[in-house]
Amino acid sequence: MHLLTVFSHPIRSSYPGQVMDAFHEPFRAAGQSIDVLDLHAEGFDPRFAEADHQHFWGADIPDGIESMHRRVEAADSLAFVFPVYWWSMPAMMKGWIERVFTGGWAYQYGAGVADRGMQPLHGLLPHVPTALIGIGGSKQRTYDKYGYEDAMRTQLDVGVFAYSGITDVESHLIPDIEAPGNTENRAAGLDEARSIATAFASPTRRTRNAKADHLNRRVAMAP
């Protein structure tokens, strides 16, 4: 089995980097291969530029994007590890999705972009298990009070991954780790990352459907 982890933080030795390492421990213990796509270390350019816009409308794919496609296609499971910035993933990771999840590869309307708005959308990516791990400085009660965690799940699990065909998504938040002196919560967060990975890699893991779960929650909340 092969895991692709997309990681976004400018400092590899940061706490989010430690969370990623802890998450990988059960995979390495099981002998699974891991491809770490460290967006900062690899110098990925997250800017959706003219070439990306032209490709959206049918021009050739920009340089460097097909190699990203191949790395995603080689994976049996995906993970995204990132610090929470402004209640979502960092711009670097969001830019990676915007540039790499291209039309005709990640999704398609009818026969192509000319059918946008006229034909149904089809997500094209394979249904590989996908885990999102956000590392937040704020306390859990802040996320609960304002609905930030639910908003992240709606935007990312449903609006990005399920939209592109990856419905088997699970999101996790490791909150309240602000300041290097917060040693107790940080240690607990690393243990949580290991537990998440153990369950995620388990052969008995239940397949999820992020879109169906989201719609069911909305129905349950309706007056």
Image (tube, rainbow, N blue to C red):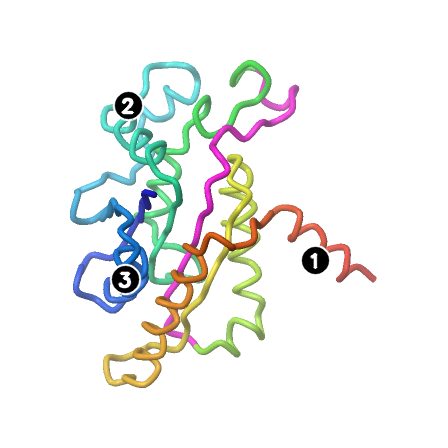
Residue at 27% x, 59% y: name it: 29
**Between 127 and 137, the one nearer to me in the picture:** 127
Quadrant in which the C terminus is drawn: bottom right
Q: CA distance from mark 3 to mark 1?
A: 33 Å
**Between 172 and 156, the one nearer to me in the picture:** 172
Label 2 CA crowd tier, 10 Å (few <14, some 14–19, many 20+)? some
Q: Position of residue 188 (x, y in %)?
A: 35, 79
- Label 3 or label 1, whichever comes before in sequence order: 3
Quadrant in which the N terminus is drawn: top left
Residue at 46% x, 46% y: name it: 129
What residue did someone put label 2 on? 62
What residue did someone put label 1 on? 217
Residue type indicated by callout 3: Glu
Q: CA distance from mark 3 to mark 2?
A: 35 Å
Q: CA distance from mark 1 to mark 2?
A: 39 Å
Whether label 3 touches label 1, CB < 8 Å: no
What residue did someone put label 3 on? 25
Residue at 36% x, 32% y: name it: 73
**Between 67 and 159, the one nearer to me in the picture:** 67
Residue type indicated by callout 2: Pro
Asked if the magenta segment contains residue 133, the reply would be yes
Residue at 17% x, 64% y: name it: 13
Residue type indicated by callout 1: Arg
**Between 78 and 104, the one nearer to me in the picture:** 78
